[in-house]
């Protein structure tokens, strides 16, 4: 974990200073930065992203077919539909979606997630250390990006950037098994999954507590802002007890 500054002109994270050492552009205010190795096929969040769109769409289509059959054929028509090949077709479609998702996630290979924390919010950038053509297509990016020097960073090719302002967060959830902080906005929609390391947790938890701990949103009790009279002691205790044992380092699974 380190202090960095972001250059909007060349989209790089560099050491804090007056200007970017690569393009000479003006740098933003310093912010906290950490990087984490990420394997999409082993990550539930990566599976959740396409499935939370595909499954409701499939259910909506199935409900529409059943409703249409009910209107045209009545209860007998619905019974014939459900006793026929329709349920098996739905299962085959579901299996096909799962296999397609598996193939895409396998092709995405290993990534480096670069997380930046500042007073305005969080930014998660995806970098590819080995950006082959199939890998880029699996990320829904053109293979021509390999030739774009502006996207080449120290730890890989920049293929995605997600930003979330603190004011947009409506719910916070802690997933200790995967060392991830999940941020929702609105309440029911996952906006950002932030990978956390043992080194980054103290600053991240302090920022979440400061920015969101006094708002009326659902969040873990360990991040809720304590009473002012005992703020220091309770805050330190929460940070020590809330984060599970994790190997420290610049990279973590």
Image (cartoon, rainbow, N blue to C red):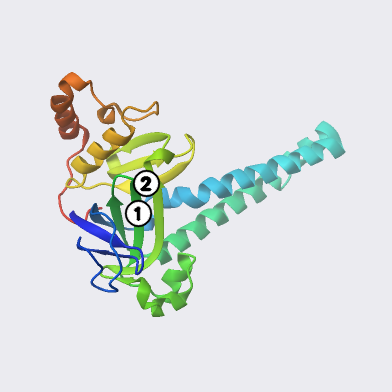
Residue 225 lies, with reference to residue 204, above or below; the image says above
Q: Residue at position x 40%, y 47% from top?
A: 164
* Residue nearest the observer in this picture, 176 or 69: 176
- The picture places residue 195, in percent across and down from the top left corner, at 30, 48
Mark 1 nearby-residue class (10 Å; few <14, some 14–19, many ≥20) = many
Residue 166, quarter of the rendered image = top left
Q: Secondary structure at mark 2?
A: strand
Residue 60, quarter of the rendered image = top right
Image side of residue 8 versus residue 242, left or right: right
Q: To which residue does mark 2 refer?
A: 193
Between marks 2 and 1, how big is the CA–CA gap? Answer: 9 Å
Q: Residue furthest bottom?
A: 147
* Residue nearest the observer in this picture, 10 or 82: 10
Earlier residue among tags 2 and 1: 1
Mark 2 nearby-residue class (10 Å; few <14, some 14–19, many ≥20) = some
- Tag in front: 2 or 1: 1
Q: To which residue does mark 1 refer?
A: 124
Residue 231, quarter of the rendered image = top left
Q: Secondary structure at mark 1?
A: strand
């Amino acid at each position: 974990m380190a202090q960095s500054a972001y250059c909007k002109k060349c989209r790089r994270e560099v050491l804090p200073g007056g200007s970017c050492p690569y393009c000479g552009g003006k740098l933003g205010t310093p912010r906290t930065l950490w990087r984490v190795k990420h394997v999409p096929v082993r990550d539930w969040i990566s599976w959740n992203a396409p499935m939370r769109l595909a499954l409701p769409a499939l259910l909506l289509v199935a409900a529409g077919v059943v409703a249409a059959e009910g209107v045209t054929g009545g209860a007998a028509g619905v019974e014939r539909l459900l006793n026929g090949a329709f349920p098996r077709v739905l299962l085959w479609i579901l299996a096909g979606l799962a296999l397609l998702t598996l193939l895409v996630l396998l092709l995405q290979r290993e990534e480096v997630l670069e997380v930046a924390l500042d007073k305005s919010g969080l930014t998660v950038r995806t970098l590819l250390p080995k950006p082959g053509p199939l890998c880029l297509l699996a990320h829904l990016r053109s293979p021509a990006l390999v030739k774009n020097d502006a996207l080449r960073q120290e730890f890989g090719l920049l293929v995605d950037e997600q930003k979330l302002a603190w004011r947009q967060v409506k719910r916070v959830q802690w997933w200790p098994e995967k060392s991830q902080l999940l941020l929702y906005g609105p309440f029911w929609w996952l906006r950002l999954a932030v990978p956390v390391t043992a080194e980054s947790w103290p600053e991240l938890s302090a920022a979440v507590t400061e920015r969101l701990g006094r708002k009326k949103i659902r969040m873990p009790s360990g991040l809720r802002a304590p009473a002012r009279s005992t703020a220091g002691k309770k805050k330190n205790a929460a940070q020590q007890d809330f984060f599970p044992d994790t190997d420290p380092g610049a990279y973590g699974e």
